[in-house]
Each structure stands twice: as C-alpha cells, then as structure tokens.
C-alpha cells in the first residue's frame, strides 16, 4: 500500500474522516426514505369549503366596532340579512356603575345551528382605551363562536392557544365603588352682525352595587345670542340670554328581582321656564315585569313618583303667584324590546298636581325598527303630549323677540312629532370585506 506521507499535509488531515463521510449518507438514506413514505401515506388536509363557514348576522345598533370585528374574526362569513344566517348575534350595550360598559352578545342559532343559543358578556373599565375595549370584545366573541365552528368543516383549520393569566390578587377599593366625572364644553360662532356662544359645565358622582344605586348630578349652562338689527335708519343691539342650572340626586334600593324603591330630589333654575328657584323631593317605586337581568333584551317597567315642589318665579305667573308649594305625582310605563325581528321602544307618562287634577301632563312616545322581509325594514317613531301643567307661565304676553329667539316658554295645549321611513337593500348577502377609504 503506498505511503501517504508524500501526498501533502491536507491528505494527512482528511484521511481520518474520509470513512465517516462515506458511511453517513448510507445511514441517512433509510431515514429519508421512511420520512418520504410517511408523507406519502399521510392524507392531505381537506380544503376549506367557503360555503361551510358559519354565516353570521351581526346585529348591533350601538358602538361595537363592526369593521374591527370583521377584520379580526375572519373564519366566518358575515351576511347583511338575518334570514340568510346560521347565527344571529344580537349585541346590546349598557353602562356599568363604574363608568364602563357591559356588552351582552346573544348568539341565536338558526338553520343547522337551531336551538344552539348562547349569551356572552364583556365588561370594559371606565376610561379604558378603545383599542383595549375592542380587543377584549373580539376575544369574547371568538371564544363563543368555537361551539358553532366545531360543527363545520373549517374546524380542523382552527388553532387555539392560551397564555397563563396573571395571578389574581385581592385589591381594596379606596373609593368604595364611587365614580366621579366632570365635563366642560362650549361653542362660539358669529359673523359681522351676529354672534352667539354657550358654555356648559357638569359634574357627577354615582355608586352602583347590586343592592344600591346612588346618582348625583350638577349641570350649568349659559347661552347668549347678540344681533345687530337695522330699524328706523339706525342699528340696535338685541341680546338674548338663557340660563339653566340643575342639581339632582337619587337613591334607589333593590328589593328582589323585580322591585326597587327610592327617593329623588333636586334644585334648579331655568329662565326659559320663568323659574328663579325650584326644589323637589319625594319617594318613588318601580316594578319590572321581566327580571332586571333581562334588561338588555327586553324591558317593561312601571314607575310611581310622588314629589313635593317648591317654586319661586322670576315674574308673576298667569295665576297671579310669585311662589307656591305643590304636591305632584304620576306614573311612567317604559318598554324596550330587542329581538331578531327588530327593535321597539315606548314610554307613557301621566302626572298631575294634587291641588288641582286639571293641572296634568299626558305624554306618549314610541320608536320601532321592524324587519318586514329579506332586506326590507320599516322605521318609524312618534310622540305627542297633552300639556296642562305649566304653572310658571308669566302673566304678561311674550315679546316678538322672546318668541323668535325661544327665550321664553309659551302657553300650549299640546305638542306632537313623528317620522317614518323604509329601507330596502338587495344584492350579495356577504359583506366580509372592510375598506376604510373615504369613510
């Protein structure tokens, strides 16, 4: 065998590893062959059938970030009409005692998901950034949809991950569930011969627990308008001022799933109503036909209020008084209903003064949005009132300026208003795409 000593130093280095380099491919070939066999035997993943995604009708009339939901929850098909859906999601929103919002998501199965119903809730904190609120709402919705996705052909393509939640800890609330808020706003506008501005300040405090509800609110508004009017060859300045201040307080105690009792009071000043100072205080009671926990979907309550009113007027009233103290009582009935067929709400009030039953007020209001057929909705609303309780009307007649500028309340036996409209849409039932351009 020839010697390697004269072949150069690189041969002396490579000689020991050459056998290993020759043996390694021989050992690797069986492994690769086995892997290839397993890959060939493995069945390919079934393709995602676009017609097998859950069809979802997202029914939300409040701010529930519809575009964001469609962008983040992409494993369903969103349809524009409830009659084309597998799953009707009705979203309702109501404020919490801490100043946040409670989102209630009622998932109602239809068609292949018939009788598969679920109710989800997400609660946001007071002052929480919008990004955190909408992200939390989407997370709750994704978890709730898994029950329905499991019944479809896209289930094998859904992956679920989790992260360990932060360790719970008990915290003490130094505010004892009290929440405080303040607000200041104003507006200024004008031109050469006219200017106007208004300023409004408000503050509030509330405390809400399962047993108690306490609300205190204070608001003040000052509005002023100035006009330069040409008359008799000269220019005169017309100034219109309205001042409105109000302090209100309410304490309510829950008694069972349907009853509540409380006390309400307040003080106010209103130049439009000829009231220099008004005071009110009295008890109240409320009965709910449906348990309060169903209030996001349906609500029918009756309230009774009794209050003592002490009034002092800016000017002598139509009845020759500058001040008076009267008892007043009445009943209010309120109804709200949100169902897959649409929404409907109404309110009926009747109040009168005990010293004279002829001094009364009867008011009724109602609104509805009804889905009549696929793509067709009827929207309507109306309100009317019979007014016989304006004790503060001034004795003197209102000037033309006060009437035109709405600086003073006028005598009126009734008020009314209404509107009606039809909405019809047709075409593609799918609306998955979100395009924010020129929104």
Image: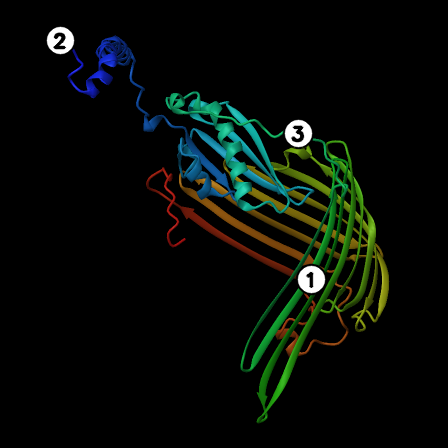
In the orientation shown, which residue stands out farthest toward the front? 6
Instruction: Where is residue 426? Give x, y as percent.
Output: 35, 42
Cα separation between marks 1 and 2: 105 Å
Secondary structure at numbered mark 3: loop
Task: Tell me which label, 1 or 2, sits earlier in the chain.
Answer: 2
Q: Looking at the image, which residue sits at the far bottom?
A: 233
Vertical position of residue 303 compared to residue 181: above or below:
above
The residue that disc 1 covers is 201
Res. 155 image quadrant = top left
Where is mark 2, residue-wise? 2
Question: Considering the numbered disc 2 on the image, is that residue within a helix, a strand or a loop?
Answer: loop
Q: Do the residues labelled 3 and 2 touch (CB within 8 Å)?
A: no
- Which label belongs to residue 363? none
Residue 239 visible in rendering: yes
- Left or right: 121 as drawn, with respect to 268: left
Q: CA separation, marks 3 and 2?
A: 78 Å
CA separation, marks 3 and 1?
A: 39 Å
On the question of residue 62 being in view, the answer is: no
Report crowding for label 3: few under 14, some 14 to 19, many 20 or more residues within 10 A (C-alpha). few
Q: Position of residue 159 (x, y in %)?
A: 43, 25
Q: Which of marks 3 and 2 is nearer the N terminus?
A: 2
Tell whether 398 sits left or right of 111: right
Q: Check disc 1: other Cα within 10 Å, few if <14, some if 14-19, many if 20+.
A: some
User: Residue sitting at 53 percent across and 27 percent down?
Assistant: 163
Note whether 306 is above or below 372 in the view shown. Answer: below
From the viewer's perspective, tell me whether residue 190 is left or right of residue 407. left
Looking at the image, is mark 3 or mark 1 nearer the viewer? 3
Pick whichever, 42 or 137, lies toward us: 42
Quadrant position of the N terminus in the picture: top left
């Amino acid at each position: 065998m020839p010697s390697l000593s004269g072949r150069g130093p690189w041969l002396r280095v490579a000689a020991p590893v050459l056998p290993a380099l020759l043996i390694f491919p021989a050992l690797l070939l069986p492994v690769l062959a086995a892997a290839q066999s397993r890959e060939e035997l493995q069945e390919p993943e079934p393709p995602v059938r676009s017609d097998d995604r859950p069809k979802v009708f997202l029914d939300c009339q409040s701010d529930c970030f519809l575009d964001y939901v469609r962008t983040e929850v992409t494993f369903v098909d969103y349809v524009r009409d409830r009659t084309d859906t597998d799953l009707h999601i009705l979203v309702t929103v109501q404020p919490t005692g801490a100043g946040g919002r409670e989102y209630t998501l009622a998932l109602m199965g239809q068609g292949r998901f018939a009788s598969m119903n679920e109710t989800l809730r997400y609660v946001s904190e007071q002052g929480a950034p919008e990004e955190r609120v909408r992200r939390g709402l989407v997370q709750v919705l994704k978890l709730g949809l898994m029950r329905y996705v499991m019944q479809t052909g896209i289930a094998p393509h859904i992956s679920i991950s989790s992260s360990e939640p932060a360790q719970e800890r008990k915290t003490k609330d130094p505010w004892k569930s009290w929440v405080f808020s303040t607000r200041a706003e104003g507006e200024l506008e004008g031109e050469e011969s006219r200017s106007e501005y208004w300023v409004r300040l408000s503050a509030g405090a509330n405390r809400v627990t399962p047993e108690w509800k306490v609300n205190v609110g204070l608001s003040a508004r000052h509005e002023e308008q100035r006009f330069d009017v040409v008359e008799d060859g000269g220019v005169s300045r017309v100034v219109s001022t309205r001042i409105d201040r109000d302090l209100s307080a309410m304490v309510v105690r829950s008694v069972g799933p349907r009853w509540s009792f409380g006390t309400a009071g307040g003080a106010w000043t209103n130049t439009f109503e000829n009231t220099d100072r008004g005071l009110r205080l009295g008890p109240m009671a409320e009965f709910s036909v449906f348990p309060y926990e169903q209030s996001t979907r349906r609500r029918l309550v009756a309230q009774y209020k009794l209050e003592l009113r002490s009034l002092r007027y800016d000017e002598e009233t139509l009845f020759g008084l500058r001040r008076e103290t009267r008892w007043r009582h009445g009943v209010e009935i309120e109804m709200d209903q949100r169902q897959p067929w649409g929404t409907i709400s109404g309110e009926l009030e009747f109040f009168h003064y005990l010293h004279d039953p002829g001094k009364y007020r009867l008011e009724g209001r109602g609104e509805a949005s009804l889905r009549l057929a696929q793509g067709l909705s009827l929207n309507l609303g109306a309100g009317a009132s019979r007014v016989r309780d304006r004790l503060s009307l001034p004795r003197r007649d209102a000037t033309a300026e006060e009437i035109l500028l709405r600086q003073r309340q006028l005598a009126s036996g009734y008020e009314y208003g209404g509107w009606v409209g039809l909405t019809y849409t047709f075409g593609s039932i799918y609306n998955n795409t979100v395009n924010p351009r020129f929104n």
